[in-house]
Amino acid sequence: MLYFDYCATTPLDERVAKLMVDLNGRVFGNPSSVHRFGQEARAYVENARRQLAKSIHCEPSEIIFTGSGSEANNLALWNILQGEKKHMVTSPVEHPSVADTVARLKEFGISGTMVDVDSHGLVNPADISKAIRKDETGLVTVMMANNETGTLEPVREIAEICTEAGIWFHSDAVQALGKIPVDAKEPDITSMSFSAHKLYGPKGVGALYLKKGVRLHPHIVGGGQEQRMRGGTENVAGICGFALAAELATGTLREEGVRLDMLRDLFVNSLRAEFPQVVINGHPGEHLPGVVNITVPGISGDALLMNLDLDGLAVSTGSACSSGSARPSRVLKVMGIPDDLNLQSLRISFGRYTQEEDVATLVDVLCRHMRNLSNVAQEVTAA
């Protein structure tokens, strides 16, 4: 079994798993309780807060722990309802936890402007600037790295535009943390979302970075946890596992990034040597290390995925199956890729445990299935 879907989720780091097992068995107090059991749990949560804050260069008080990256996105975006400005700006390549929230907010009187992206899925900061309405725009949200193509968005330039205009800028950094440097202070971003399971941490744990001094209205209320910004008893072991995973991942960013880009280049060059017609989607230079989205003209992406899975190789498509029919990827669609080619795409993402020989195996098996499926398609056409 070989895994090439690290953008979807990552294996739990053994060091993180060991810490979580220890804490789950030993530290069971409620962090909100005043007795020693509760205060022991509270101490672990606050230490994890400091640990995660160090990984993104912010103050511990600027970290709000959540149940997922999606919740963190929702927490930031729904806050616009409480403000006086009822207009927001976003891009068409955002994660569903952002895109669907923007759509829902329209039901509550929030208008939105969606800027275009180019053929690489890249937002033009100038378009963000033009879309901002003086005295009306309360929020701009653009992701840091795309989950389907790996394209890195120009968040620095967008942050500068928003800072100058005095507008809240939120960035979905779920795919970025642990893969590229993330600095909360440079650029000056108001809020960012993170998720533990994207960087070898546990599922069901996320975080929102919220710039000091910014007021947030919680949408989960209860016991007043997380500085009264997110109700609910904290997942002590999960939070500590998240913080450790972030520390471990950010500690090896440079060397791991070089290694993953080498694996990506090896994959692309080897695949194109056999099938020159393969198209690489996304930005050719500004992309996450180890992530590649390909289109194989004339061959169904879903068919390739299923055949690879039968051989024990896990990859991903950008399409979603609904009522038995595959749907084109929304992200590739707005990049101008026609539906037929859209449905002939795969996302391959390498990670910490991917080796050169694994990439070689992937290329060999993938090419074999591409040849077989291409021959079948030709026979069907001839018949």
Image (cartoon, grey):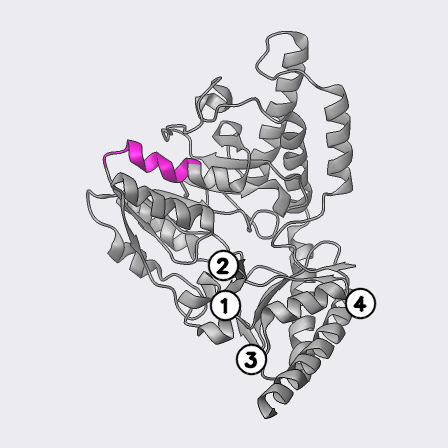
Of the residues shown, which amino acid type is indicated by label 2? Leu
Q: Amino acid at mark 4?
A: Glu
Q: Which quadrant of the view contains residue 350?
A: bottom right
Whether residue 228 is in magenta: the answer is no
**Badge 3 local density, few (<14 within 10 Å), some, or many (20+)?**
some
Alpha carbons under labels 2 and 1: distance apart? 8 Å
Q: In this rendering, is residue 63 above or below 123?
A: above
Looking at the image, the residue that sits furthest to the left is 135
Label 3 to label 2: alpha-carbon separation: 25 Å
Query: What residue span does the magenta drawing correspond to?
Result: 75-84
> Which residue is identified by label 3?
297
Could one spot residue 275 in this view of the protein?
no
Q: Quadrant of the C terminus?
A: bottom right
Report how far apart the C-alphas of labels 3 and 4 lie in the structure.
26 Å
Q: Say which mark, if any, is on residue 283.
A: 1
User: Horizontal and vertical percent for residue 124?
Assistant: 36, 62
- Neighbourhood count class around disc 1 (C-alpha, 10 Å): few under 14, some 14–19, many 20 upward: some
- Frontmost of labels 3 and 2 is 3
Is 205 situated left or right of 372 in this image? Answer: left
Report the Cα–Cα distance between label 4 and label 2. Answer: 28 Å
Residue 196 locus on image (x, y percent): 61, 41
**Residue occupied by mark 4:** 357
Residue 79 magenta-highlighted: yes
* Three-letter amino acid code at the position of disc 3: Pro
Q: Residue at x 71, y 47 (%)?
A: 11
Q: Dot 3 lies on which element? A: loop
Q: Which mark is residue 152?
A: 2
